[in-house]
Image (cartoon, helix red, strand yellow):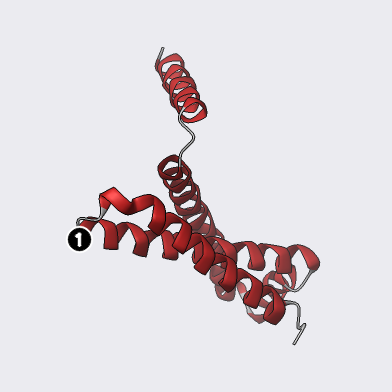
Amino acid sequence: MENTKFMNKAKTYLNDLRLNITTGTISHVTHRVTGIAFVIFLFLHIFTLSSVFRGPEAFEDALLVYDSPLGRSLEFALMFAVSIHLINGVRITIIDFLNLSQVHKRYFWISFIVFSIIVILSVAVFFRIF
């Protein structure tokens, strides 16, 4: 019974999102998804660091996973998520504390431009283009 209630609520939530695609909705969903991604990353990070208790060899083996194309991709995804979550969080804080909800769309696009600049520079550094 509980599972059915959850599924119905999830379907309603997804349907509402689909019908109401605005800058606020995009911002809300992005912030939630990146927040959940951080929780997953935190558990992976703790798991990797806990391998030090199994000895230096186990720790080195755990670190080798991150020194691969998959590990580099996950590292880049983490940078991407941190950037978007941080910039969106700052945008939300500014809008809330300065009572600027009337112009939140403008701040969304400003934060999107700042995020794009950060990602472009990060790609250049991450893939050693410069």
Q: Can residue 46 be spotted in the picture?
A: no
Measured along the vertical axis of the image, is residue 19 above or below residue 45? above
Q: Amino acid at mark 1?
A: Phe
Decide which of 43, 98 is in the foreground and name it.
98
Q: Is residue 4 left or right of residue 54?
A: left
Q: In the rendering, at what x and y percent does residue 33 appear?
A: 50, 47
Measured along the vertical axis of the image, is residue 25 above or below residue 35? above
Decide which of 26, 43 is in the foreground and name it.
26
Number of labels in the image equals: 1
At a point 64% along the width and 68% down the height, the residue shown is: 75
At a point 41% along the width and 21% down the height, the residue shown is: 9
Q: In the rendering, at what x and y percent does residue 92 appear?
A: 32, 57
Is the residue marked by circle 1 packed among few (<14), some (14-19), or many (20+) residues within 10 Å?
few
Figure quadrant of the C terminus: bottom right
Q: Is residue 62 left or right of residue 51?
A: right
Figure quadrant of the N terminus: top left
SS category of the residue bearing label 1 = helix
Q: In the rendering, at what x and y percent does residue 21 appear?
A: 49, 34
Q: Is residue 57 left or right of residue 42?
A: right
Q: In the rendering, at what x and y percent does residue 117 appear?
A: 58, 72
Image quadrant where residue 79 sits: bottom right
Q: Can residue 90 be spotted in the picture?
A: yes
At a point 79% along the width and 67% down the height, the residue shown is: 69
Q: Which residue is mark 1?
A: 97
Measured along the vertical axis of the image, is residue 69 above or below residue 99? below
Please identify the residue farthest to the bottom as the structure is shown.
130
Measured along the vertical axis of the image, is residue 121 above or below residue 88? below
Decide which of 89, 50 is in the foreground and name it.
89
Q: Is residue 31 left or right of residue 66?
A: left
Image quadrant where residue 28 sits: top left
